[in-house]
Amino acid sequence: MSTLAEQLRNTEAHKSIFESAVRQNPLPVCAAFGSSDHPQPVSFRSSDRVLGTKDSDNVRAQFPQTVSASGNIVLASAGPSTAKVQGKRVAVLFSGGPAAGGHNVVCGLKRVLGAGNTLFGVKAGPKGLLKGSLFEITDANVDFILNTGGFDFLGSDRTKIKSDEQFAQVRETCIKHKLDAIVIVGGDDSNTNAAVLAESLFSGVKADGSGVQVIGVPKTIDGDLQIGDLLAISFGFDTATRIYSEMVGNILQDTSSSLKYWHFVKLMGRSASHVALEVALQTKPAITLISEEVATKKMSLASIIDHIAQVIVERSHKGMNYGVLLAPEGLIEFIPEMNAMIAELNDVLAHHASEFAALADDAKAAFIGSKLNPDNASLLASLPDYIVKMLLAERDSHGNLQVSLIPTEQLLIDMAKSRVKEIDPAVPFAAHNHFLGYEGRCGAPTLFDAAYTYNLGLTAGSLILDGRTGYMATITDLTSGGTPKAIPLAGLLNIERRHGKDEFVIEKALVRMDSPAMQYFAARRDDWAGNDLFASPGPRSVLGADDSSATDQRRLELRGGFADVRDRLSARLHRVASGHRQRWPLAFFRRHSGFRAAAFATASRTRRVLSSGLNHAVEACGSMVACLSSGPRWRATNGRRTDLRGHRVGALASAPGNRRDLRRCRAVRCLLRPATVASGRGPDRFRRP
């Protein structure tokens, strides 16, 4: 009989029960790729869609080779590829912050490239590409990282490749490792870098004068990389918002239990408030600040504080000396007077970098203040020292203020406390601050993100085998199973002010004030502020089918605007209540980022799911068995895990939806279907199935 110590040791190095289970999760593929067991590459054709921005003429002048080759025309899949491409040497790297599903991009790449081509992993992101830190990715690697969270298989960093010396280093790496293509998995800044690299490596790299292909894959948990119906959402957003929503729901539950604390929660979202809006729609807290609304209404810092204080006082008068406030991390940059100050601050820091670096810390604020105009200097001097210190901190490699380091939530607490005392000194106000950021980046991907990223990897690999460069992989037509497409990166470029000068960038998608999501939020938030109407969504689903609740589907309907969703849902619930078994759909990819998927049951194989939550692992007859604490349905026989019908299962599921699936003991295949995107330039309504 194995000891508990041995069993615990066996779960080390990413071999927990959970991780072992998610690796077995089957992944659906777009019909264009054929079988999910053996996906085949697709070829691409030009569509009738041409992209361009207000700066297209300048882009064409700076990116002549890639623009000439692509014509900035969107590519659509043209059926299975008939070409038998072999000998390709492809490198893949992660760039920027981690997001759930990155490993599945690598898995999709490896599987579509096949045994005839070689896939290399680049260690530590763009920095590793400069150093030539590459290793070959094997089938065993892919099996081990499938459906797991994080970027730890390759690592990542935020190095921006922009100098002539760096471009020369990339060329040396390409020549040394005989690379034919590079895949960059990243956000808007990283895909901008991919566009620049595609132009730099377009030709003249190899001895025959040919170049190295560069393909981008859209990643960011912020949800600000959206391109209308061509790119509904970047991967990682769904997983992150569901993790944050669970945590915020727990905090909300605590506030109404302890009855004495306010919690100010800062969420990810440097340049857009998609995460904050999404979490608010799921959890219904008392106050949620939307950066884009602050900018649109030209709200001052004082007016924001006054609004917060008024809600605190009004709730207190109703006997509620508690609540939750959500704020995006980039809020401070959207307050007009703060934005003006930061813009000038960035220019001053860029032009006086050497002088500033030589100063003692206690002299830096005064030096910068002397270089600002009087209004901005006065505002800087009025802020707490801990805010000033962060405003003067070093920018990231893309020239961005590191807003995640600015304790905006603490600033709001301090200022709100003073304002509450001015309005009503008798109102008690005790607050805690939180920053939910890193917690959401590396969790195991949700059902949606797992399938989405795998198909993005298949698409990126197909583009390479089809000889394309300067494109970003995407999946559209999600309501009908998904269509692989490619977006010309040069067609997305705009000119923005960075590091005190104009640079080409991909524009971020912000929350639109006229989006259905924002309009619904605006209509309901006063009720949320004045009453306890919060919700606790619970954990995300990463295994098996998941029956979405009526509440989830109605929320999606309100966000998407499809009137028949409620009717179809009600009919479905009636059939279930009447005892009718449905063979379709047993579940939806749950909601939040704006996606759902129908899950179909098959009897071809036994479903393996996770033993966790209310289940307890115990030793019996020399093996670990799962015992559900909430009922007699399950029993252990001779060390085997068996349900009362005699079906053998890998483990018991903690989620109620998964327990229901285990009754049928069936495998689940998921067909991607979108519901809606929280807001921004992406589609704001359902597409009919």
Image (spheres, rainbow, N blue to C red):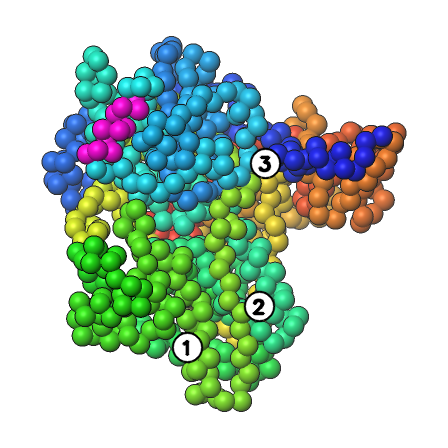
User: Which secondary structure dominates the residues rendered in magenta?
Assistant: helix
Label 2 vs 1, first from the N-terminus = 1
Task: Look at the picture and state if 272 lies above or below 644.
Answer: below
Snapshot quadrant of residue 401: bottom left
- According to the picture, the residue beneath numbered tag 2 turns out to be 533
**Mark 2 is on which residue type?**
Leu
Asked if residue 2 lies in the magenta stretch, the reply is: no
Task: Please provide percent x and percent y for residue 207.
Answer: 21, 13
- According to the picture, the residue beneath numbered tag 3 turns out to be 599
Instruction: Assess disc 3: are there few (<14), some (14-19) or many (≥20) residues with their C-alpha within 10 Å of its C-alpha.
Output: many
**Mark 1 is on which residue type?**
Met
- According to the picture, the residue beneath numbered tag 1 turns out to be 415
Answer with left or right where residue 497 lies relative to residue 650. Answer: left
**Which of the two discs, 2 and 1, sits closer to the camera?**
1
Answer with left or right where residue 603 lies relative to residue 119. Answer: right
**Mark 3 is on which residue type?**
Ala
Give the magenta part as a residue range: 164-174
